[in-house]
Image (tube, rainbow, N blue to C red):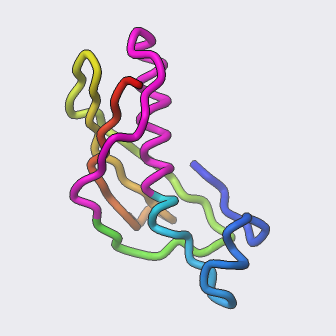
Amino acid sequence: FKDLSLDDFWVRGHIPGRPLMPGVMMIECGAQLCAFWTMKRHPEMGFVGFAKCDDVRFRGTVVPPTRLHMIARMVEMGRRRCVAKCQGLVNGTMVFEATITGMSV
């Protein structure tokens, strides 16, 4: 999870007066979660970088202060590539989903 606050660096510049977490940051959270999991479970892959995202859907807004929960399910694991289905939730409601691909760099 990530606790978002009104002091986060992006809040002032992203829609002044109505801060919404940028979608690209939500996707990056999912990519980092998947890379972290992959590097822990498969250290032989080394560093895993963000390669691609597909099927992205934004279904709600993320407005601080709040907690964004990230969940992911690995759907494909290869020697140099991994693919995961990711979701972000706020108060139990899905706010985005994406399929994220990582590659050994």
Q: Main secondary structure of the magenta part?
A: helix
Looking at the image, the residue that sits furthest to the front is 105
Residue 35 image point, x, y percent: 44, 32
Above or below, 67 against 14 in this view is: above
Residue 8 image point, x, y percent: 73, 64
Magenta-highlighted residues: 27-56
In the displayed structure image, the side of residue 27 where residue 77 appears, left or right? left
Task: State the residue at coordinates (66%, 56%).
Answer: 3
Looking at the image, the residue that sits furthest to the right is 7
Above or below, 84 against 55 in this view is: above
Residue 77 image point, x, y percent: 24, 24
Instruction: From the viewer's side, name the closer residue of 30 and 14.
Output: 14
In the displayed structure image, the side of residue 27 where residue 97 appears, left or right? left
- Quadrant position of residue 9: bottom right
Task: State the residue at coordinates (40%, 40%).
Answer: 50
Looking at the image, the residue that sits furthest to the bottom is 17
Task: State the residue at coordinates (34%, 35%).
Answer: 102
Above or below, 89 against 28 in this view is: below
Residue 20 lies in the magenta-colored region: no
Task: State the residue at coordinates (34%, 48%).
Answer: 86
Residue 97 image point, x, y percent: 32, 58
- Quadrant position of residue 48: top left
